[in-house]
Image (tube, rainbow, N blue to C red):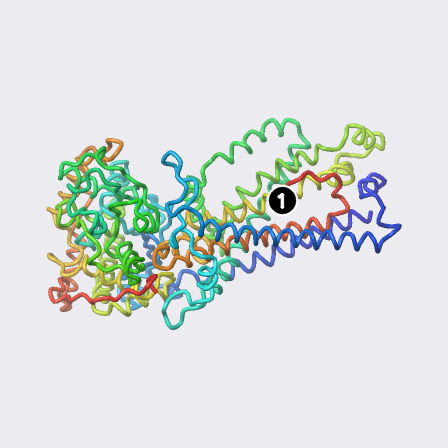
Amino acid sequence: MTRTAELAPPAAGKTRPTRGQARRGQAQLRRILTGALGLIVLAALWELYKLLGPADGVVVGGTTLLPRTSDLAMPHLWVMAERVLEPVTGAAAALPLWLVVLQGSMFTLGIAAVGWLVGVTVGLLLALLMQRFRLAESAVLPWIVLSQTVPLIALAPLVRRWGSQIEVGNFSWESWMSVALIASYLAFFPVSVGALRGLSSPDANHVDLMHCYAAGWWTTLWRLRLPASVGYLLPALRLAAASAVIGTVVAEVSIGLRGGIGRLIVEYAGAAGGDPGKPWAPIFGSIAVGLLAAGFVGLIGLFLRRFRRGEVAA
Amino acid sequence: MKHSTRWLGMLGTVATVSALALTGCSTGTDTDDGSPGAADGELTPVTLQLQWVAQAQFAGYYAAVDQGFYEDEGLDVTITEGAADIVPQDVLASGDADFAISWVPKVLGSIEQGANITNVAQIFERSATTQISFKDAGIESAADLKGKNVGSWGYGNEWELFAGMQKAGVEVGDIKLIQQAFDMNGFLSGDIDAAQAMTYNEYAQVLETKNPKTGELYQPEDLNVIDWNEEGTAMLQDAIWANADLLESDKDYADTTVKFIKASIRGWIYAAENPEDAAGIVTAAGSQLGQSHQLWMTNEVNKLIWPSTNGIGMIDEEAWQNTVDIALNTKNETGATIITADPPKTAWSNTYVQQALDELEKDGVDVKGEGFKPLTVTLKEGGA
């Protein structure tokens, strides 16, 4: 019990709570402003390059370093924005593009969340296993690293095929589960590695102290290792969230799941010539999904802020 | 103790949020397959694996589902869309689909590698693959490709191009082969002189784009088109493939095959007679293509089928042999050919389509469409 208390941040805030809170609020505001400024700078760079960059792009020795500045290759930001407000197609019943992309984003986010959850669970279990048994670490860790070298395009059709053969009672495997599984395959990796590092991070003398208290493995885990791992775990969770989103979008394209952002990216790509703003809409959608996912992990970080001492940068 | 309970609270939050996400997902996909009459226990369930996502290239099958033609034959057909990494003939050979739609040259390679499947109906009589270029590039035939930047999607889509070049005496080394993307931007921006284009898709994509010089959409007059049908190196494209082992051993499957072909043909006849409705059916089935583009595709695909020389679906032995010859003798940029030996006899059969056509003709259905008149479709910007 005393150990956890020590791991909490120094109680400086207790003496002057209002000033500390105000300062924190200011820092928060500054962070938001910096973030917004970054976006504006990015937008300005895009338009500036489009205005001043060479029409044929920057090509060095036959390799294109920067793209053409044509309306096809780099549509104006306002073209993209305008396009989002218009209907998807000329059909009378066509929904506005932003709504279709929003629906796709929610679909993708849902699958990514499932993939993330499965990945995080598996990753944590593997980390615990490896922390508990040295033998497991030397047996499993190389495979975990190796697993990430299997290309997704080889994996995706296999997952779909195996999945389609699963049918137990009323449960039948659906395509979205294959996508979630592939997302979790990408997501579990950073978690297992990060959590392992975190669980092994307490100093030897802290562990020895637990030994002196005659604390068992579970107690040591709960009182010492888990709290100590938070600083390693949060960046890993954030990385896993990003991986899950990317994995979901790629797997949607790969195995052909309809309804999400991946499908929209593929289907809108053909309009790149005649309707240059359209293919960008699902790309922004996937960025929004990524931000939401990262924000969710940030929320977890908020809950765990008492443990976030000396956090390793993401 | 305080911290531990917070930890637990966090876990609870995560669990709740994910449970919500889970339920959200499962209800979202339930309505996905869109097959009618699934509740009817007497229908035979059939799965059709397409080559790509829903689009008018497959209008006949979607129309047959929508109009209940499959149901009339006692079939409950589920159409499975293709995707970037899904190979329809592999899905068929592994038993995950009952029938598949794929191009003949692509399947010939799979057959040589051991996939035991049969072409039971050659739906598209003509090839839709062309090589298009702007008029000022002066590329009017395969011989003119020499020294040019030539685009191709690869992955088995390049063989007609290579065969045409080989026939015209242009070596693969004489051109600069450029990997083409899903869009036509490489062609429009001038990186590609002659780009691969399907009449029903990419060709239209160009015609849906504003010509910066005129401010109007590009017109057919702005483009030169090398049509492999005219160059004599066309290969057979969309065909219905069935499992050869089952055709031989399972009488029911053979019967189902005839029924499936028959209903599919009725679907294609519907698409020829009602192109606007057929395009609408495909869009309703989930295609994201614009209205004018979808109609254009329906119309162009109809032209590949109708008028049909021997009756829709009949495999023309000469055309088949031509495809096989090209597959045997055309070398790609790595020097490889599609196949190294003649395909087995099981690679194609007119038995089933003949039966289907006979039944249809007995009902007075016109299976040749001699009077077929294509529409004139006006494309809108971006295909809208």
Q: Amino acid at mark 1?
A: Leu
Evaluate whether residue B121 shows in this view. Answer: no
Position of residue B104 measured from the top left corner of the image (x, y, whole percent): 22, 46
Q: Residue shown at 78%/34% (left/top)?
A: A216
Would residue B145 be visible to someone looking at this image? Answer: yes
Name the residue: 48% across, 51% down: A48
- In the image, residue A15 sits, relative to residue A92, either above or below, namely above
Circle 1 residues within 10 Å: few <14, some 14–19, many ≥20? many
Identify the residue position indicated by label 1 in the image.
A237
Q: Chain of mark 1?
A: A
List x then y, in percent, for residue B335.
24, 31
Q: Nearer the viewer, residue B208 or B6?
A: B208
Residue A113: x and y in percent read: 57, 52
User: Taking B20 as reference, is B227 left or right?
Assistant: left
Q: How many marks?
A: 1
Give the SS element for disc 1: helix
Please identify the residue farthest to the bottom as the structure is shown.
Answer: A92
The quarter of the displayed image where residue A137 is located: top right
Q: Is residue A97 above or below residue B243?
A: below
Residue A15 percent across, percent down from the top left: 89, 50
Give left or right: position of B318 versus B68. left
Instruction: Name the residue nearer the viewer: A256 or A132.
Output: A256
